[in-house]
Image: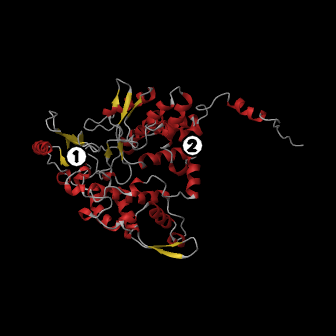
C-alpha cells in the first residue's frame, strides 16, 4: 500500500454532519485498499472541517507507516471491527477479552446508554419513541414469570438477562420466547398470547445488542446473529386476522374514483372563511394528497410526507423518491431518513393527474421551506411551526382520520384503519391489471422486489398472470386416463 499516489481521503458532509472518507486495508484482503466512511458526529462548520482535515493528514501518515489501529482511533465503529493490532487479533469468538460482559443483562447495561444517546442530543439518529420501545422490551426481559409446560406443571422461568452470552443459542432463545409469549400471567388476566410483532421487537433488540458487542470487539460473531431460521411462531388468531386483512387490500376503480370525488366535494363545500381561511386550504391539500397517492403508489405517510419540491423533476416528468419520514411518535421526535423502507431510491413518472395536483399545490409553496405537503392548521404549540404558522405535514393520524371518515361516509369496508395504506395497493393492482408494464417495472415503481409484489397482489389481479386459454387447459385434466370424469347430476 505504500507508494500509491491516490488521494488519501477527504472530509465530507452527510446529513449536516462531517464524516471521514479514508482509504485503508480491505476487510477480506490486507493487500487491497478499501474506502471507509467514519462518522465524526460533528456539525458541518468551517472550523470543524479545518480541524478534521488536519487530523486526516495525521491518520494518512499513520496508514502509510502501518501504525493505524482503528480500535484506538475510532472505537465502537464498523472499521474498528477489522483492526489487526495485537490485542484485537487475540480476540476469539465469545471470549472475555476487552472485559466483555458475561451475561445479557450486563450487555444491556452497556447497550442502554448507547441507544439513549442515539435517540437524544446532537447524535440523534433514531426516534425517542423507538428508544422507549426498546427500553421497555429490555426491562421485560429482566423479570421472572411463570409458564405452564407440556406436562401441565407451573414453572418459574428465569429472566433472559440471566443467561450467559454463550448460552444464547437459537434453540434456547426460541424456547424462552415461546414461554414468554404464552406466559401464565397473560392467561390469569384474561388475555391471549403476546403479539408476534411484540415478540419480534424483543428478538430484534437482543440481536442489536449482540451486534453492538460485535462492533465493540467483545466477540467476533455470535450464533444468534448468524441464525436465519424462525424463532417466533405466529399465533393462529394472528394468521387468520392477517389473511382477512389482505382480502381487502386494494380498492376497486369505482371505489377509488368515489374517494377522490368525496375529498373534492368536501373542498368545494367548505367555506373560504372557515377556521380563519385555513380549513379550505387543508382540504385542498388532502384532496391532492389522495390524488398523488392513488397515481404514484408512494408509501403513505412515510414517503408522501417526506416529499420536497426538489424531488420533483418536471423536465423528466418524474418524482425522485429518496427519503422517508418516521411518522410514529411525537411530532418533535420525528426524523427524516435519507432512504426508504426498502432502502431503494427510485423515480416515479408524473402522469397528467399528478401534474395537475402539483401545479395546484405550487400556488401554496412556501419560499423558506421545501416540503410539498404542510399543515395549514398547525397550532402555536407545534414544535416545527415557524413565525408565519407554517409546519410540515407529519404523522399518519392527520391523514388516517380524514380517510376513515371518507370510507365510513361511502360505506366502504376498512379493516383495522388500513385506508390510506390501500392507495398504494390500489395503484399496484391497477398497474398490473391494466397496463403493459412488466412485473419488474411495476416492482421498481413501488420500490419492492418482484417476488414480494407477486405474493401480495397476484390474488387481487383479474388479468395479470392469467390467460384466456387457462380454462381449456384445465379441462384436459378430465380427459386423462381410461375413463372420462362426468359431472354428477342430481336426480
Q: Judge by depth and name the residue closer to the eye, 308 or 222.
A: 222
Q: Which residue carries the number 2 mark?
A: 410
Q: Judge by depth and name the residue closer to the eye, 263 or 150.
A: 150
Query: Residue lying furthest top in this view?
Result: 315
Q: CA distance from mark 1 to mark 2?
A: 53 Å
> Residue placed at 59% from the left, 32% from the top?
465
Mark 1 residue crowding within 10 angstroms, few (<14) / some (14–19) / many (20+): some
Q: Judge by depth and name the residue closer to the eye, 290 or 46.
A: 46
Horizontal side of 206 relative to 403 (left or right) equals left
- Frontmost of labels 1 and 2 is 1
Q: Quadrant of residue 349?
A: top left
> Residue placed at 78% from the left, 33% from the top?
479
The disc at residue 473 is none
Q: Quadrant of residue 350?
A: top left
Residue 236 x %, y %: 58, 58
The disc at residue 38 is 1
Residues tagged 1 and 2 counted as in contact (Cβ below 8 A): no
> Residue placed at 35% from the left, 25% from the top?
314
Horizontal side of 262 relative to 477 (left or right) equals left
Query: Residue lying furthest right in this view?
Result: 491
Residue 384 x %, y %: 29, 48
Q: Quadrant of residue 151?
A: bottom right
Whether 175 is drawn above or below 449: the answer is below
Examine the rendering and report whether any part of residue 251 can be seen: no
Residue 273 x %, y %: 38, 41
Mark 2 residue crowding within 10 angstroms, few (<14) / some (14–19) / many (20+): few
Whether 99 is drawn above or below 297: the answer is below
Q: Secondary structure at mark 1?
A: strand
Quadrant containing the N terminus is: top left
Quadrant containing the C terminus is: top right
The earlier-in-sequence mark between 1 and 2 is 1
Amino acid at each position: 500500500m505504500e507508494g500509491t499516489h491516490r488521494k488519501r481521503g477527504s472530509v465530507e458532509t452527510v446529513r449536516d454532519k462531517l464524516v471521514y472518507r479514508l482509504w485503508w486495508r480491505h476487510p477480506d484482503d490486507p493487500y487491497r485498499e478499501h474506502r471507509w466512511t467514519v462518522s465524526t458526529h460533528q456539525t458541518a462548520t468551517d472550523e470543524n472541517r479545518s480541524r478534521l482535515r488536519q487530523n486526516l493528514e495525521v491518520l494518512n501518515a499513520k496508514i502509510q507507516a502501518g501504525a493505524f489501529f482503528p480500535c484506538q482511533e475510532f472505537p465502537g465503529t464498523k472499521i474498528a471491527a477489522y483492526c489487526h493490532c495485537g490485542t484485537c487479533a487475540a480476540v476469539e469468538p465469545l471470549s472475555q477479552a476487552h472485559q466483555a460482559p458475561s451475561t445479557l443483562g450486563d450487555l444491556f447495561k452497556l447497550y442502554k446508554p448507547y441507544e439513549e444517546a442515539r435517540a437524544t442530543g446532537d447524535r440523534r439518529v433514531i426516534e425517542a419513541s423507538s428508544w422507549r420501545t426498546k427500553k421497555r422490551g429490555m426491562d421485560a426481559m429482566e423479570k421472572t414469570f411463570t409458564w405452564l409446560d407440556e406436562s401441565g406443571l407451573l414453572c418459574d422461568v428465569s429472566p433472559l438477562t440471566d443467561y450467559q452470552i454463550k448460552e444464547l443459542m437459537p434453540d434456547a432463545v426460541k424456547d424462552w420466547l415461546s414461554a414468554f409469549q404464552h406466559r401464565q400471567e397473560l392467561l390469569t388476566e384474561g388475555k391471549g398470547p403476546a403479539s408476534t410483532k411484540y415478540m419480534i421487537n424483543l428478538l430484534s433488540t437482543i440481536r442489536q445488542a449482540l451486534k453492538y458487542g460485535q462492533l465493540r470487539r467483545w466477540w467476533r460473531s455470535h450464533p444468534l446473529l448468524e441464525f436465519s431460521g424462525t424463532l417466533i411462531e405466529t399465533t393462529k388468531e394472528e394468521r387468520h386476522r392477517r389473511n382477512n386483512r389482505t382480502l381487502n387490500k386494494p380498492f376497486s376503480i369505482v371505489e377509488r374514483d368515489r374517494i377522490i370525488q368525496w375529498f373534492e366535494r368536501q373542498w368545494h363545500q367548505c367555506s373560504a372563511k372557515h377556521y380563519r381561511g385555513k380549513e379550505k386550504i387543508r382540504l385542498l391539500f388532502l384532496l391532492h394528497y389522495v390524488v398523488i397517492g392513488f397515481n404514484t403508489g408512494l408509501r403513505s405517510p412515510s414517503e408522501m410526507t417526506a416529499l420536497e419540491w426538489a424531488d420533483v423533476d418536471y423536465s423528466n416528468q418524474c418524482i425522485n423518491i429518496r427519503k422517508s419520514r418516521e411518522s410514529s411518535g411525537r411530532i418533535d421526535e420525528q426524523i427524516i431518513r435519507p432512504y426508504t423502507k426498502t432502502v431503494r431510491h427510485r423515480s416515479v413518472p408524473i402522469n397528467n393527474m399528478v401534474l395537475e395536483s402539483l401545479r395546484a399545490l405550487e400556488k401554496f409553496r412556501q419560499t423558506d421551506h421545501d416540503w410539498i405537503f404542510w399543515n395549514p392548521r398547525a397550532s402555536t404549540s407545534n414544535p416545527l411551526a415557524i413565525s408565519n404558522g407554517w409546519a410540515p405535514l407529519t404523522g399518519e393520524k392527520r391523514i388516517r382520520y380524514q380517510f376513515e371518515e371518507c370510507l365510513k361516509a361511502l360505506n366502504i369496508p376498512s379493516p383495522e384503519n388500513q385506508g390510506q395504506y390501500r392507495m398504494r395497493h390500489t395503484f399496484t393492482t391497477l398497474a398490473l391489471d391494466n397496463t403493459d408494464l412488466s412485473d419488474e417495472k411495476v416492482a421498481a415503481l413501488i420500490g419492492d422486489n418482484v417476488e414480494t409484489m407477486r405474493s401480495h397482489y397476484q390474488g387481487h389481479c383479474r388479468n395479470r398472470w392469467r390467460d384466456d386459454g387457462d380454462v381449456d387447459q384445465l379441462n384436459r385434466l378430465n380427459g386423462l386416463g381410461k375413463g372420462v370424469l362426468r359431472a354428477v347430476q342430481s336426480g
